[in-house]
Structures are given as C-alpha cells and as structure tokens.
Image (tube, helix red, strand yellow):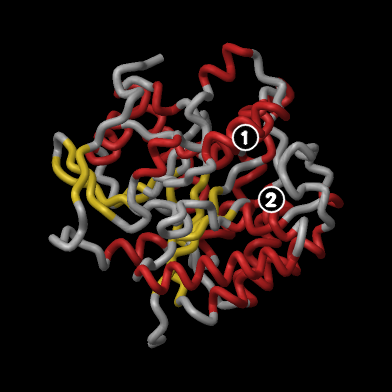
C-alpha cells in the first residue's frame, strides 16, 4: 500500500461529434467517431503505468453499435464507468426535471448495454450543473456528482471557443454557461456535500490550482506545452506543490484529444493543441504523469468517494444556481 497522498483521474469520453455539435457544425448529425482510435491508445497509455481511472461515457455513443466494442474494452480493463449524459448538450442545466430524468435513464441503459456496468457517478457535459440535475441524480441513487469546475478562466475559455465556432447568436445564448461561470470559481476545490431536498449528494470538483483557481487539467497543460515544455512542467510542479501545501487530493481531468493530434485528422483544428503531432503530445503527457505519480497515488473517482462517506468533516452547501428557474 502506497503512502503517497491520493489523486483521482477521470476522462470525459467526448467524441468527435460532441465537439462538432457544441461548436455548431451541422455535420455532427452523422455521429462521426474517433473512439476506435482513441480508446485503444488511451488504454495502452494507462496500462503501461498500471493506472485505473474513471471514464465518463456519453449514452448516445454507447447506443450506437459501431462504438460498443471500444466501450466494452473500458470495463474489461477494470476502469470505472460513469455517466456523461445521453445527448451531450452543455445546456443540460436548462432541462426540466422530467427531461433530466429521461436523459439520465436513457444514458444509464445504453451505457450498461455497452459496458455491462450500471453507473453510479455523473459529470455534466460542458460542466453544466443545476439544482434540478442534482436532485435528479439523488432520486436515481447516484453516489456522486463530479461536475463542478471552480476555474477563474471559465469566461475566457468560453469567449475563445465562441470566437472559433460556427454558432449563431441564439446558439451562443443557449451555451452561455459553457465551461461554467465566473461564480463557479467561488466554489471549493475539495470534496463537499450538496444539501438537497431529498438529502445529500457528494460532489468532487475538477481540481483547479488551490487559491489561484486556474486550470490544471491535462488539456491546459498540453496547451502550455505547445508554447514551452519547460513552462508546462514548471506549472505542473507548482500545481503539485500547491495541492500538497493545502492538503488537496487533486481530481484531475483528461480528454481523448489529450492523446490525439495532427495525424488523426479529426477535423477539430479549432481545439487548442490539435495542430500538435501525436508523438509530441504523448511525450508531454508522459512527462506530466511522471511528475504527478511521484507524488500521488491515482484512484478512480468511485473508490475515492467511498472513503468520503457522509462525514462531518465535509462542508455542506445549499444547491443554488442562477439559472435554476429556467427550463427548455
């Protein structure tokens, strides 16, 4: 048993069509996929380091026969499977309770059909979160939510995305909470409990740098590495140090595009670092993992959250969001 502090690792398995849909490209409706390329590459990377993580799977992908072999490999390799919604719409916070219940139920059934696993954890697409979502998760028996993203750069990330998108003004309005809002940066970086109508639900935020609340997920580290490998490694070391000083067990986020590059021809050149060769990106990722694994013991989210329980040491927050009274 390692005496290193723990960290959790998760990967939002956003597919090619999900990025196109959020970006406003109508060709998403043909559901182009790179899972047959990305999943084996990711699994090999994790196997080489003897790491198990949590994969947040999109229900629509799980429902499509051409993806089921790739998705079945995830659970077969011993990784945790969790829910990333059915339709992957970052405006999920605008759904009514009835729509949310249907969205989660459809995803649960599709994901179980593809992986053999009944999911117990959730992360909203585009970090979309609402009181109605949390209440629905609680009523459906989920163990945790992992959507909160307390990042001060959320508005800048959204503005950059919009500037590269094909979205109409109406679509931008619909996506105005994409990546989270500035007020989300005021939320904690450590686990806490939501105080809901039906009880409590554990929340594991995607960790940002303690105190500064700037991102430390791998896509951001790779983005920095595109300018300077030394800068990216320095920033990673600083993030590790801040987590150690504040007693934060980080929850770090991966995406498939962290393992894909120029040669994969995904049509996602608008995404930062997608002009980078695959070997260069994987070399950066290897360096980040080497730094992190010297300090932290990685776990899937579900295993980590079981140790949280409902202890009094976790802060409790009333679930309130500015957009709670709006529904589609």
In percent of width and height, residue 219 lies at 63, 53
In percent of width and height, residue 293 lies at 54, 77
Q: Residue at x 34, y 66 (%)?
A: 304
Q: Which residue is mark 2?
A: 257
Q: Residue at x 46, y 36 (%)?
A: 180
Towards the viewer: 48 or 222:
222
Q: Is residue 279 visible?
A: yes
Q: Quadrant of the C terminus?
A: top left
Above or below for 8 versus 96: below
Disc 1 crowd, CA 10 A, few/some/many (<14, 14-19, 20+)? many
Q: Which mark is residue 136?
A: none
Disc 2 crowd, CA 10 A, few/some/many (<14, 14-19, 20+)? many
Q: Residue at x 41, y 43 (%)?
A: 185
In percent of width and height, residue 326 lies at 35, 16
In percent of width and height, residue 86 lies at 48, 34
| Number of the front mark, 1 or 2 | 2
Give the side of residue 241 with respect to residue 275, left or right.
left
Q: Which residue is mark 1?
A: 18
Counting every numbered tag in the picture gives: 2
Q: Quadrant of the N terminus?
A: bottom left
Towards the viewer: 164 or 310:
164
Sequence-wise first label, 1 or 2: 1
């Amino acid at each position: 048993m390692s005496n290193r502090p723990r960290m959790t690792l998760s990967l939002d398995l956003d597919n090619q069509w999900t990025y196109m849909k959020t970006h406003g490209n109508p060709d998403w409706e043909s559901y182009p996929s790179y899972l047959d390329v990305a999943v084996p590459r990711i699994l090999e990377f994790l196997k080489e380091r003897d790491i198990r993580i949590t994969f947040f799977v999109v229900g629509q992908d799980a429902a499509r026969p051409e993806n089921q072999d790739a998705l079945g490999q995830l659970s077969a390799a011993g990784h945790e499977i969790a829910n990333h919604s059915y339709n992957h719409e970052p405006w999920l916070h605008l759904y009514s309770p009835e729509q949310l219940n249907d969205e989660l139920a459809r995803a649960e059934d599709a994901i179980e059909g593809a992986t053999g696993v009944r999911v117990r954890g959730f992360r909203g697409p585009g970090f979309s979160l609402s009181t109605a979502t949390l209440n629905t998760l609680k009523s459906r028996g989920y163990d945790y939510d992992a959507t909160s993203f307390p990042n001060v750069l959320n508005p800048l990330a959204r503005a950059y995305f919009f500037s590269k998108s094909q979205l109409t003004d109406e679509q931008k309005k619909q996506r105005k909470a994409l990546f989270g809002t500035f007020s989300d940066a005021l939320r904690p970086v450590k686990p806490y409990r939501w105080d809901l109508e039906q009880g409590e639900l554990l929340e594991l935020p995607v960790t940002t740098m303690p105190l500064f609340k700037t991102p430390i997920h791998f896509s951001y580290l790779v983005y920095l590495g595109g300018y300077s490998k030394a800068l990216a490694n320095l920033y990673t070391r600083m993030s590790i140090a801040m987590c150690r000083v504040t007693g934060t067990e980080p929850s770090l986020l991966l995406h498939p595009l962290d393992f894909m590059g120029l040669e994969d021809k995904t049509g996602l050149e608008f995404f930062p670092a997608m002009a980078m060769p695959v070997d260069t990106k994987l070399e950066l990722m290897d360096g980040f993992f080497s730094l992190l694994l010297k300090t932290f013991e990685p776990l899937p989210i579900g295993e980590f959250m079981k140790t949280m329980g409902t202890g009094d040491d976790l802060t409790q927050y009333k679930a309130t969001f500015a957009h709670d009274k709006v529904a589609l």
